[in-house]
Amino acid sequence: MTINLAVVGAGYWGPNLIRNFAGLPECRLMAVCDMDPARLHLIGEQFDVRTTTHLEEVLSDQEIKAVAIATPAESHYAVADACLRAGKHVLVEKPIATTSKDAENLVSIAEMAGRILMVGHIFLYDSTVSRLIQVVQAGEAGQIRYVHGVRTSMGGTARLDTNVIWDAFVHDAYVLPALFGCAPQRVMAVGAGYLMPGIEDVAFVTFDFGDGALAQVYVSWYALEKSRKMTVIGGEGILHYDDLAPSRLTRYARRYEQSPERDPQGRPRWKWKDDGSQPIEVAQSEPLRAECQHFIECVATGRKPMTDGHAGLETVRILEACQRSLENNNKWIEI
């Protein structure tokens, strides 16, 4: 079965979706919609596809069965709502919406319409991140003590319409719950806007998953270099993910063990044990292509997406809690 699809939004991220969907044999890219004729002209030169500046042309085309949305985040709800009501299956880029109320509405509309609603949580389709989650869930590092993450960049990414929480930290807001196997119980965020007052370009976010399990992530557009790292400290070892390193995932057999030795007060000492490290080999693939392939398969089979509307809603709830913490003197906010 070939799925006829349109892409709405041809700005920053849209061309990547267009390229991937155009290359899938199970998909026929029928149309690209954008408000900027110049962008559409460039797309038309690269791909054999109809272009339009009018969303209604996509909505009214009965041959188009699915739509991928890569418009600015503040328009996600309106565009996705229109597409679902027109009977289209929808893939919408992160975040699914800018409020949990709008996200809830999209989930309800999709369910009533019997249509697929999927969110572009791209790092969950990354083979290395997926392997990290599998290894952690299998207990290969023991019980998680805490997680430390870094997601930074420098140059060309500072935005004027939203802060670094909604733009960059959104990825950690869906990866960390998958890693821990549950949503955080509460969050605390501290941030500052050095480039544009009122728009945080750096933030430090802490998650409390209960039972002493913590996660802390530093995100910034205003850093020395681009970095995507996550370190998982467990009772039996340490796992380190570095998206930009030659070996992206490594297991370190490092841990503390209780020693029979005691200090002068009779307390047992803890001894550091290091049994070396070993890279975890992972077959590499393009995450966005895997994401697009998954969407087409779900549309064709009716299968529930791995990152469905409910997953998108939970992520927005976490982001809203982070935002409330920023706005309330960095207080802990219950999820």
Image (cartoon, rainbow, N blue to C red):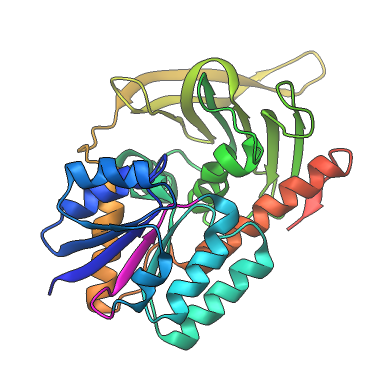
Instruction: Give the residue drawn at x 23%, y 49%.
Output: 20
Where's residue 176, x and y in %?
Answer: 54, 46
Q: Is residue 259 visible?
A: yes
Instruction: Give the residue drawn at x 39%, y 79%.
Output: 115
Q: Quadrant of the N terminus?
A: bottom left
Rendered position, 304 above or below 266: below
Where's residue 81, x and y in %?
Answer: 52, 72
- Image-quadrant location for residue 188: top right
Q: Residue furthest right?
A: 329
* Residue 214 lies in the magenta-colored region: no
**Near-viewer residue (156 or 176):** 156
Left or right? Give the position of 253 relative to 327: left
Where's residue 201, x and y in %?
Answer: 67, 28
Q: Name the dominant secondary structure of the magenta segment.
A: loop
Rendered position, 307 above or below 321: below
Q: Residue furthest front?
A: 37
**Near-viewer residue (37 or 275):** 37
Q: Is residue 182 visible?
A: no
Instruction: Give the residue drawn at x 40%, y 53%.
Output: 34
Q: Quadrant of the C terminus?
A: bottom right
Where's residue 322, x and y in %?
Answer: 72, 46
Left or right? Give the position of 129 relative to 146: left
Instruction: Give the residue drawn at x 22%, y 54%.
Output: 21
Q: Which residues are magenta?
A: 62-71
**Near-viewer residue (197 or 261):** 197
* Residue 68 lies in the magenta-colored region: yes
